[in-house]
Amino acid sequence: MAGGGKGAELLTKVGLAAASVGPPAVVGAKFWSSVAAHPVVALFLFLAYEAALAAIAFAAKVYGKVADRWVDRAADAVDRRLKWRISRFERDHRAYVLRHHRFIDLKGLATRGDYTPGLEEVFVDVSLVPRPTHEASQESLAGPVPGPPPGGTDGGIPVRRSIREFLGRPEGAALAVIGAPGTGKTTMLKHLALGLARERGGRGRRDLPVLLLLRDHIGAITANPAITLPEVIGASLRRPPDDELPGWFDRQLQDGRCVVLLDGLDEVAREEDRRNVSKWVEEQIEQYEPNDFVLTSRPHGYASAPVNRARVLQVRRFTGEQITRFVHGWYRAIERLSTGTDDAAVADRAEEGARDLLARLHARPVLYDLAANPLLLTMIANVHRYRGALPGSRAELYGEICEVLLWRRQEAKGATAAPDELSGAKKELVARELAYVMMADRLRDIRGEYASEVLRPVLLRVAATLSSREFLDAMVSSGLLVERERELYAFAHLTLQEHLAALHIQHRGLADVLVAGVDDDWWRETTLLYAARVDPAPVVEACLSEGGPLTINKLALAFDCEEEATELAPATAARLRAVREQLMDGPVDSPQRMVMTGVTLMRSLRSAVRLGEDTLVCARPVTKEVYRLFAAECGIPAAPGLTEGPADDIAVGMTRTEAVAFVEWVNARAGGEFGYRLPTWAEVKDEAFGLVLGPGNRSVWCEGGAEVGRHAPPLLWVPDGAEQPWAVPAGAVDGAWLGWSIKDDVVFSEGSLGLASAITRHTGVDRGRSSVVEINFEIRVRGAVHGRSQRFGAASGSDLADLMARIHRGEGWITLDRVEAGLQLLDGEFADLGFPARIEWATRCVALLYSLGELGDGNDRSAWGTQPLAERCRPLLNGLGPLAVGHRSHFPDLCHSYAVRCAESLDELRPGDAPERLRPTIRELAEFIASRAGVLADAPHAMDPADGPYLRIAALTMAAVMDRFFHQPMLVGLYRDVAAGFLVLQRRAEGTIAPTETIVLVRA
């Protein structure tokens, strides 16, 4: 190659020499006369030619040099592009992301199992909302949200959105996602990186994930602020692919293909370093603007070093639905990993574990509040799975939570501790002192200046070198404290403040403080957390002390301490039981009994579950113990599902009028700061509400209006697939008429017997004849005909009893061929005929049905003499129009209102086809139906199943009367609804319809 280069150079020089001499010589020889005549001009032209030739030679030489360089560059570019095209670098990078971030991070949890689930198996997408930094910093890691985000939307984006909603727009996005510790910021970035690593959407899409943990690059960035993003990315690949290509990430960033995920700005410990890192992030966003950037931080860390170009998004805590999804996903993943299979048995076991945990969370509303934080929910799920249950006491679980927040999580992340940082035990000791002072001063929030005064002597005792302000900042950064406003601090949840104060009281021997506060609600939770660790006998004795009045608050605290305590002095426990028995033995309306009622209510209603952000619903439906107290005071008769059975069982089967009365009773007896109401329809349909109801298809009484507070009869919510407990069963319309059974034949036989006896007796008296007269009737028993057209006297005594017993045994029936006596005589009394009371009403029904038969329906009337009365009445009672079955509710109070309406309508009806002699009977039957419906509306559980057929046939008879005599279809329908209501009450009393109605109270 060297020889070739020299030959080319020599050839070029010879060519230039020939060009510089040859052409001028040829031209000079040809035009010599001109050259000789003008030698100066000829010389100038020669020199110009030589100069031009020299310039051309120089340009050619420059071009050669430049061409060589560009050829090299082009060759390098083509070579690089070919390498990028055929190399596995991008594929390996995506595989590295999938491999490196595959599992959920459980480091820092006090309780860990043998299995770590995959992140995508348990991930529940957190929700984001645009919010100013100063407002987001006021939200604690758990508990109720301090207030709704400003407005309902931000720039057309709804309140709760996924991170994906903010990415992938034509212009690059710069987002700062801030949230309290444990809200799932890092997990969200990892899940996003996994999704992008799988997608590979093609040209023009940002689908290349780059996830950087800023804490790993603090030194590099602060030491060299000019370091580029591609250099930092390269340093982050701890196990890079073998064929890593220089410049590859820079090209992807230049092309706008990347989603750059920067995690943990707040984990840069020194504020100056944090500002430098924030500035470096701003420079990278500006340099690589076409890409998407997502930065995460805790609010406190971001407020001191904001990224000017970033849009701030706040991470919201989990909703009830998200908690449920996470728990179910967690258990499915853990059970699959632990068993190595994924069959139906594993799914059932996972479902059982998830339901158990969710039930326990709902039974402890404070834990449910804490579970809204993904980190704490993960910790709780881990403890529940690997201990087989939650810790025996709340205090133990709260202790683990405080440890995680104070030091375990920080250690697990590998964050470098400052030289002057306290150990975990010393941090807790200082936090306990602050919590106790806040409790003693009845403070929920504390000013920074006062907090510093409290902390200084404690920090000196633990030999701390950091200042009280630095300690406060560290507690805010950990999430244990939150700075609600500038220089105004509070514990993340009041329960954590109470827990730490209880520890302080235990270690300092300050139980006298709790003894003095037994009637003060402010100290209640602290007392119970203390009782979980130490024998609370002094506190219980103070509650029972005769030195002051025995109040509901003190007595409730005594029983709660007994329930919470791991140990209690036997003498104190015996005294507590004796007090309960003494109070419950008093009269229902005695002051002592009222106190015990208030205690029972307070303890039953205190536990509540959060629905959404601002609705608290009692953690369990009303129990039989509570309903018994209500029933005793209000005179409601005992019933198996409502009051009979274990005290802790759920009360089922109350009517809607009883539900309204119960709520009024609770609000009158409970007192306290809360009122109570029935839930709305929307609240009951909330997925978390199902956990309150527990297993089984229980139905729930709800507010009747579309909005809370609207006065309307309650509605009954019935879960999908469950039967409506106040509806007519589907099979009830399959017989001869509504609810037909063999018992209906007995009703007709008894009515016929009563009719024959009444007519015979009354005819003999009125017409001067003997009491035995000849009428046309027949009695059929066991298929044999007895007494056709023979003399018949009013049955009485043993004869009547024997005849009725045979009828009830189904040995035959009684029917009349013709009734030729005046039926108007039936308005007399039946008291002295010897019949049971219900036969009087059966007789009136039979009399009306005979009259309706005489009116005719187009059939041969002679057929009436050859059939039982039940067969004769089929076209009268079954042809009255449709009846809604299976879903329409027939509540007792509604049926009563229908019966009263029908009875009152009789005065307004035209005579129609009803004979004058029958009108008193019609009115008496209508008033009887209304009266009995009223009794059952007030006391539906007093329904005697034996009365059911008589009441139902009476209502169906009146429906037939309204149809045939008065032609009133509306009244026909109302009486059929009344008959359906009687049927439902009968079936419920018999037990063939199982009551499912419950009451769940919501704090108003």
Image (cartoon, rainbow, N blue to C red):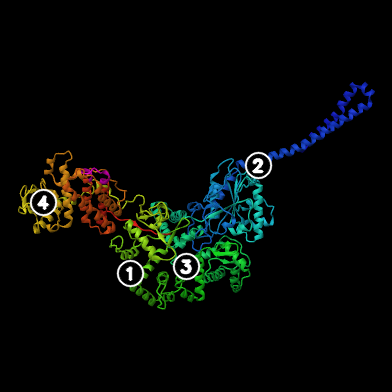
Q: Residue at x 28, y 58 (%)?
A: 938
- Disc 1, SS: loop
Left or right relative to 265: residue 538: left
Q: CA distance from mark 3 to mark 2?
A: 63 Å
In the rendered image, residue 45, in percent from the top left (x then y), is placed at: 89, 28
The C terminus appears in which quarter of the rendering? bottom left
Q: Of tags 2 and 1, which is closer to the observer?
A: 1
Looking at the image, is mark 3 or mark 2 earlier in the sequence?
2
Q: Residue at x 33, y 57 (%)?
A: 657
Q: CA distance from mark 3 to mark 4?
A: 81 Å
In the rendered image, residue 814, in percent from the top left (x then y), is placed at: 12, 50
The region drawn magenta spans: 962-972
- Disc 4, SS: helix
The crowd level at tag 3 (other Cα within 10 Å; few <14, some 14-19, many 20+) is many
Looking at the image, is mark 2 or mark 1 earlier in the sequence?
2
Q: Of tags 3 and 4, which is closer to the observer?
A: 4
Numbered mark located on residue 379 in the image? none
- Disc 3, SS: helix
